[in-house]
Amino acid sequence: MSEFIRTRSDWDNNKSRPANYPEVPEPLEVGTYDNHTHLEIADGENPVTLEQHLELMKQANMLGAVQVGVTLESSIWSAQTAAKEPMLLAAVALHPNEAPLYETRAELDEAIAGIADLATQPRVRAIGETGLDFFRTEGQEALEAQQYSFEQHIQIAKENNIALQIHDREAHTNVVETLKRVGAPERTVFHCYSGDLELAEICEENGWYLSFAGNVTFKKNQHLRDSLLSVSPSRILIETDAPFLTPEPLRGRPNAPYLVPHTLRFIANLMEWGEAKLATQLNQNTEAVYGLWSEGL
């Protein structure tokens, strides 16, 4: 994923929203947070700049976002950017599909040590995204590297008393087994929740959080909607995973944190809650996981 990281000169282009990005939705009555986004990943030939992202978030009454690293390089950028930008906190990690790309265990350990160093910074509030991905990764050696990396990341989160953001793709059983064997951090989040009712019940029993992205709006994903409705509202978070998983009715166009209101309003309707009530609950949940955005600057 590191090939998508933009240079500073890329971010300084374009002062207006590119035409391929959707219009700003009606601002939220009660602002909220995007729990997981990748502002360093360019989408298309004319991507939104960092400054544009932040301005568009303000227009939609978004309070802030958790900027998530997937490589050591993007994690460094995430931590550096959150250190000076009040609307952003950082999560740092090696993505599960990155771990097998290191040629030796020593090189992987060196990168993990870099993540551990970043985790001590006050605006780094989570280790993520880390976890297991059995969809893209094949081969015993690659899977072992992924498992090793995941367990090391769990330990870093616990040592620093910060949250854990889990990437779990077609690996539910193994992720749960690892969390129970190694010991889950106090605040554990299943990013872009992809499980069924059984996994939702396990999360509820263990006090883990389920973070829902735009794919909860997709017609085929009834299992996500069923899972959301099955757990306590105190366990629910909302995210974009931008620039991916743009919600209906905007699929096919780039995603960004300012589009959270579309997913929030969909969930509010699903839960038969008012959007202000849902945003207030989401804010309580988000701040319980990551702390206050105003701290650590």
Image: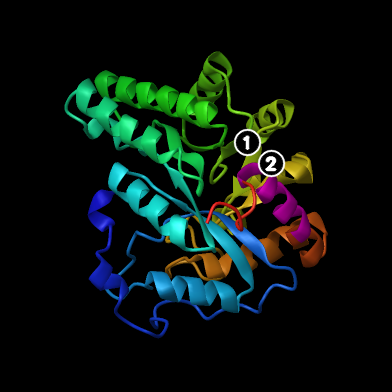
Task: Provide the residue span drawn in magenta.
Answer: 280-290
Give the alpha-carbon distance from disc 1 to disc 2, as whole Å.
6 Å
Give SS at disc 1. Answer: loop
Q: Is residue 281 magenta?
A: yes
Along the viewing direction, whichever of 24 and 12 lies nearer the viewer? 12
Q: Establish if 243 lies above or below 181.
A: below
Q: Which residue is mark 1?
A: 196
Along the viewing direction, whichever of 13 and 159 lies nearer the viewer? 159
Give me the residue at 27% from left, 57% from top: 4
Residue 46 location (% of width, % of height): 30, 76
| Whether residue 285 is visible | yes
Give me the residue at 69% from left, 72% from top: 28
- Residue 136 lies in quadrant: top left
Circle 1 packing at 10 Å, graded few (<14), some (14-19), many (20+), is: some
Give SS at disc 2. Answer: helix
Amino acid type of the residue that numbered disc 1 sits on in the rendered structure: Asp
